[in-house]
Image: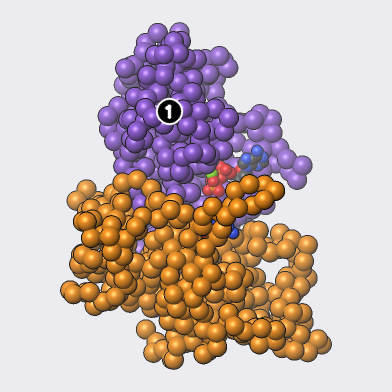
């Protein structure tokens, strides 16, 4: 299915792997927005990486910079107001931020694709879904109308839209939320991308529909050995599907870890607090553990570690020194000066 | 949990249909959206009844009818022995005082042009006999304190507060008239994970302090389990299963409840490969045209001929110890939400 004719010169060929480079690596990425109220530092040094066939979950609360990072990877940030003062986004080892607009557009949607949270507003209401899917093949693959239409039916089948042939001429509003999200997924995988970024793909959906969509994404990933970045704030979804996790807080990565390690033994006080605040059967009727205080305001980010005003482990140093992402092991890192104490389950 | 008092709210065969009309000048009714279609339950003093179910199953409509914000199509809502549908004038006003609501969205449910003091004190304007005018400011400050807000912030506006704080403002307002029943419609869904636990703890504390009865609507099943004494599962306008929290979560007997619980992701990756998962096919049918007999039968793996012919009533069935509206109800251990 891979189509070599669209490879651009100077860009790595599909599947051609630099030996010790991950498929996609975000390295010390910074993104700021210049607004009337000041400069909002939305992303302050984010690093994470993804290999082929892997699922990376990006977890974090509202405003922590998950979507902005994804938009930077896709190259769909409006600049200005956005600016990327530092960082690299390496795809097969090539820094996407250094590419020309033309080269970048060869990657966007074709080799790195994205599914957005709100499928209804991402689909064009005035065109049939079949036309919108077929358009991908006409524009990017130069297919004829008839062939593109056939491919569209195939794809709708692949994302399991019942009666795809009959429904191809329906408009987005004629589908349920879950169906629309499937159509969005169909469009995003149309060109067989190597990386799929799914930004809260099920947040607006019911759990039963969420289960269908997550199953679909897992199957598609396996079939084509695609790397999947799943952005979510749901600790349940993460535990279900992730191979590894990047936890974000205040525009930074506070922890990177394989899924089992993170749930068994979190390495950052924020992650630990989140896990402890999940209601548990054996604690029914008792007060829940709650992280105190509130998420930070981007325009007045706390000094030092952004989590320190809420942190039970904090010391004086935390208010002044920004913790680097300490490497804990080959696969784990934590941005806490006192990660050892967190690890040992030290007292708060 | 705590021992509960006598029944404070009695709901019987409650129905709310929204007319579906056609035509612009001469509106003709061509059908009805059966948002709530025959719901019965009791709520006791100091108790929490959780209500779960998929989007569009009628949870918010039920809440609005209980609040007398919508008139029921038929059926009755009885508060403290009095039918709210038959009450008029000052009696209706007094009954309304006793049942208050906390809304889902702390961002849009507060008027941005009113100060916190005005918002929390507004019920005193409507029910002017509750607190004399010169005592209201102090009363509002007390309420702010109760929900953990700084009483000195009484003159601030909603945008000066975070989501969790705004939800507290909504809760303070709900408490103003000292109701015995509070309906919480998705009170924590719009909040960040790290803030949800704070609001849950607050609701829990207030319940104990004031012996409140809650109807707690939420789509997060583990949150519902944490706070509820009993849980009602709704599907397409009907309660399909109703029981104590343990009965529903440990021994669900309705296939829909089983599917719902098994779809909830468990926040623990251990053993995820071997977890049983019932993946429902398709979407819920339209409430304008629900299936005959059992409404769940079109997505049910147990469906037989009888399910299309005969509507299963909500009753205790052989082999289960709580109410279930399935001809083939059968306790089943699912790997469920924690
Ligand atoms: N165009 C913009 N102009 C100014 N600020 C912006 C812009 N886009 C995003 N931001 C800010 O950047 C921060 C990070 O936003 P982002 O959308 O990445 O958060 P998120 O982690 O995806 O949150 P959510 O879970 O709510 O989707 C936010 O504080 C947001 O207000
Ligand atoms: N004012 C109205 N007029 C017509 N139909 C309505 C009205 N209010 C609600 N409905 C319909 O009634 C059904 C039940 O809606 P309701 O808002 O009670 O669902 P819900 O269970 O609260 O869903 P959610 O979880 O999405 O909040 C839906 O099909 C809805 O579209
Ligand atoms: Mg986002
Ligand atoms: Mg609702």
Direction from residue B87 to residue A194 in the image, left or right: left
Q: Position of residue A45 (x, y in %)?
A: 53, 39
Identity of the residue furthest to the right in this view: B134
Asked if residue A105 lies left or right of residue A206, the reply is: right
At 51% from the left and 33% from the top, the residue drawn is A171
Q: Which chain is orange?
A: B
Could you tell me residue A276's position as x and y percent?
A: 39, 64
Point out residue B102 in the picture as x, y percentages from the top left corner.
58, 70
Q: Dividing the image into 4 quarters, which one contains the N terminus of chain A?
A: top left
Q: Kindly identify the residue that appears in the image at 26 percent across and 76 percent down.
A: B316
- Asked which secondary structure carries label 1, the reply is loop
Question: Which residue is rendered at x = 59% and y = 71% of the image?
Answer: B71
Q: Is residue B327 above or below residue A232?
A: below
The percent coordinates of residue B256 (x first, y second) are: 31, 59
Q: Quadrant of residue A339?
A: bottom left
Q: Quadrant of the C terminus of chain A?
A: bottom left
- Camera-side residue of A22 and B68: B68
- The residue lying at 40 percent from left, 51 percent from top is B285
**Pointer 1 residue:** A168
For the question of whether residue A262 can be seen, the reply is no
User: Taking B189 as reference, is A207 left or right?
Assistant: left
* Chain of the residue displaying label 1: A
- Specify the colour of chain A: purple
Q: Quadrant of residue B89?
A: bottom right
Residue A264's place in the image compared with A158, above or below, is below
A28 or B228, nearer to the observer:
B228
Q: Is residue B111 above or below residue B282?
A: below
In the foreground, A275 or A19: A275
* Vertical comparison of A140 with B266: above or below: above
Label 1 crowd bin: few (<14), some (14–19), many (20+), radius 10 Å? many
Name the residue nearer the viewer: A289 or A336: A289
């Amino acid at each position: 299915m891979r189509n070599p004719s669209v490879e651009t010169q100077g860009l790595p060929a599909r599947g051609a792997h630099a030996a010790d480079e991950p498929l996609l690596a975000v390295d010390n990425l910074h993104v700021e927005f210049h607004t009337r109220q000041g400069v909002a530092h939305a992303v302050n040094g984010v690093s994470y990486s993804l290999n082929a066939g892997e699922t990376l979950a990006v977890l974090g609360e509202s405003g922590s910079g998950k979507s902005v990072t994804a938009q930077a990877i896709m190259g769909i940030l409006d600049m200005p107001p956005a600016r990327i003062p530092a960082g690299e986004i390496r795809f097969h080892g090539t820094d996407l931020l250094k590419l020309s607009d033309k080269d970048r557009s060869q990657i966007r949607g074709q080799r790195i694709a994205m599914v957005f949270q709100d499928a209804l507003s991402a689909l064009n209401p005035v065109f049939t879904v079949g036309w919108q899917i077929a358009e991908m093949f006409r524009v990017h693959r130069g297919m004829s109308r008839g062939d593109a239409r056939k491919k569209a039916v195939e794809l709708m089948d692949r994302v399991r839209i019942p009666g795809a042939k009959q429904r191809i001429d329906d408009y987005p509003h004629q589908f349920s939320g879950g169906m629309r999200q499937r159509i969005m997924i169909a469009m995003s995988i149309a060109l067989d991308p190597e990386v799929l970024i799914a930004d809260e793909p099920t947040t607006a959906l019911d759990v039963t529909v969420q289960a269908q969509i997550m199953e679909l994404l897992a199957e598609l990933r396996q079939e084509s050995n695609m790397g999947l970045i799943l952005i979510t704030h749901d600790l349940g979804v993460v535990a279900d599907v992730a191979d590894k996790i990047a936890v974000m807080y205040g525009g930074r990565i506070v922890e990177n870890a394989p899924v089992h390690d993170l749930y068994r033994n979190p390495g950052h006080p924020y992650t630990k607090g989140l896990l402890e605040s999940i209601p548990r059967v054996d604690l029914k009727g008792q007060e829940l553990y709650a992280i105190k205080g509130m998420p930070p305001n981007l325009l007045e980010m706390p000094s030092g570690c952004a989590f320190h005003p809420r942190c039970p482990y904090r010391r004086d140093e935390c208010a002044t020194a920004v913790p680097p992402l300490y490497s804990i092991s080959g696969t784990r890192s934590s941005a806490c000066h006192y990660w050892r104490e967190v690890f040992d389950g030290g007292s708060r | 949990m705590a021992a509960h008092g006598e029944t404070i709210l009695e709901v019987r065969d409650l129905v709310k249909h929204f007319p579906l009309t056609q035509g612009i000048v001469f509106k003709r009714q061509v059908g009805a959206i059966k948002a709530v279609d025959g719901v019965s339950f009791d709520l006791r003093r100091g108790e929490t009844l959780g209500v779960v179910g998929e989007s569009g199953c009628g949870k918010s409509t039920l809440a609005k009818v209980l609040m007398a914000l919508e008139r029921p199509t038929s059926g009755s809502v009885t508060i403290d022995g009095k039918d709210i549908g038959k009450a008029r004038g000052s009696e209706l006003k007094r009954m309304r005082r006793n049942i208050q609501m906390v809304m889902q969205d702390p961002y849009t449910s507060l008027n941005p042009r009113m100060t916190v003091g005005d918002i929390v004190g507004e019920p005193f304007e409507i029910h002017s006999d509750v607190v004399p005018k010169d005592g209201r400011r102090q009363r509002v400050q007390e309420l702010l304190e109760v929900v953990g807000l700084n009483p000195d912030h009484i003159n601030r506006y909603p945008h000066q507060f975070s989501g969790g704080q705004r939800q507290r403002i909504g809760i303070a307002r709900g408490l103003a008239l000292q109701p015995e029943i509070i309906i919480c419609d998705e009170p924590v869904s719009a909040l960040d994970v790290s803030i949800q636990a704070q609001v849950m703890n607050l609701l829990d504390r207030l319940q104990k302090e004031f012996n409140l009865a809650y109807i707690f609507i939420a789509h997060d099943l583990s949150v519902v389990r944490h706070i509820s004494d009993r849980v009602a599962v709704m599907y397409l306008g009907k309660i399909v299963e109703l029981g104590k929290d343990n009965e529903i979560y440990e021994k669900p007997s309705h296939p829909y409840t089983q599917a719902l619980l098994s779809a909830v992701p468990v926040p623990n990756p251990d053993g995820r490969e071997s977890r049983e998962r019932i993946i429902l096919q398709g979407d819920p049918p339209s409430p304008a045209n629900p299936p005959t007999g059992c409404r769940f039968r079109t997505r049910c793996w147990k469906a037989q001929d009888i399910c299309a012919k005969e509507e299963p009533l909500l009753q205790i069935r052989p082999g289960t110890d709580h109410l279930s509206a399935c001809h083939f109800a059968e306790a089943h251990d699912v790997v469920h939400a924690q």
